[in-house]
Amino acid sequence: MSEYFVNDKPQRKSSREVHTADCKWLLYAESKTSLGEHDSCEGAMKAAENIYPGEVDGCFFCCFPCHRGEPK
Ligand SMILES: [Zn+2]
């Protein structure tokens, strides 16, 4: 289990990235919200979707299985 966070500030375009607590990119988030502990990024993404529906994406580095990239 790891604690996950969602960046409150959208980064690239409109996506707010989900990170694990130890991801170095989380250090650059000015404001973040804890998503609690999850077994995998899938659970964290669901929690983030409840806060920011349709605006979240997994971090390329720490949540690669949940990384969707830019919408086309
Ligand atoms: Zn990350």
Image (cartoon, rainbow, N blue to C red):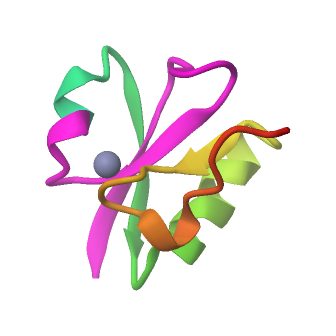
- Say if 31 sits above or below 71 in the image: above
Residue 68 coordinates in the image, percent (x, y): 65, 55
Q: Quadrant of the C terminus?
A: top right
Q: Residue 22 lies in magenta, yes or no?
A: yes
Q: Which residues are magenta?
A: 1-25
Vertical comparison of 45 with 26: above or below: below
State the image coordinates of residue 70 (x, y, percent, origin top left): 69, 38
Instruction: Give me the residue at 72% from left, 51% from top.
Output: 49
In the image, residue 48 lies in the stretch drawn in magenta: no
Residue at screen point 14% across, 41% down: 24
Determine the image quadrant of residue 25.
Answer: top left
| Residue 69 x/y as whole percent | 63, 47
Q: Is residue 24 above or below residue 4?
A: above
- Give me the residue at 44% from left, 80% from top: 40
Residue in the picture at 61% in, 50% down: 48
Viewer-proximal residue, 52 or 63? 63
